[in-house]
Amino acid sequence: MEEKKALISFCKADIAGGDNVVIYDLDMEVYPGDFVYIVGKVGSGKTSIIRTIIAENRLAGGKGEVCGYDLTAIRDRDIPFLRRKMGVVFQDFQLLMDRSVEDNLSFVLQATGWKNDKAISGRIGQVLDAVGLTNKAHKMPHQLSGGEQQRVAIARALLNEPEVIIADEPTGNLDSETADGIMMLLTKINRERGTAVVMVTHNRALFEKYKGRVFECGKETCRESHE
């Protein structure tokens, strides 16, 4: 049987936040189908790990590889190609407020090289169906609830069939019932599609209810918890 290759691999990695190292000697491997939480208090370096994964922050030391790209040697021109292999979901949705749901999604596809209008329309239909928003394509973001906006953000993350979804506090701005719906959606995508999920959260109730591997950050370290 072929051994699975890690999508994300850090070995003795030093993670920077701004000019300072915030986490030393991070060892982390994320494989296809994994659901991984990065947890810890505010300021413990969780988001800095995410920024390093998407090559927004440079690796400060050690080794790191994401979706086949060596983070110690990645060239600026290759960073967009790395990011196309991932879907990123933010706490504050980051939708374009001056255009419809469909146009938000179309914009991303066109920016990543899609040119055929029929193919673009078909793909948008597929991802909106996957997040339960088939009938919201022509709505403007301000006409949607917070939970619906986050579902659009998840649909956007799915557009180019990513190997891994990176979610930075995706439920942080949502009430607990809406957050539950988002978690059920992410776990369904993970289970049914085999898409790995790496999620930053400080909400212990979520990662206790929706099981996954947990990395706990604190005092310049981040270690996998085996509770």
Image: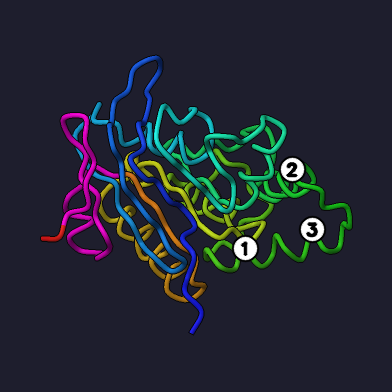
Please state if 107 lies on the left or on the right of 156 as rendered. right
On screen, residue 98 versus residue 90, left or right, reads right
**Which x, y percent locates residue 149?**
50, 46
SS for tag 3?
A: helix
Label 1 belongs to which residue?
A: 127
* Residue sitting nearer the eye, 185 or 19: 19
Q: Quadrant of residue 158?
A: bottom right
Residue lying farthest to the left in this orientation? 227
Give the residues drawn in magenta, as a range. 201-225
Element marked by disc 2: helix
Task: Estimate the x, y position of residue 118 in percent, counting from the top left.
Answer: 86, 63
| Residue 211 belongs to the span the image colors magenta | yes
Colouring used for the render: rainbow
Q: Which label is found at residue 107? A: 2
Residue 174 in the image, given as x and y percentages of width and height: 33, 44
Q: Label 3: which residue?
A: 120
> In which quadrant of the rendered image does the C terminus lie?
bottom left
**Label 1 residue SS:** helix
Residue type of the residue flagged with mark 2: Phe
Looking at the picture, does residue 79 appear above or below residue 29?
A: above
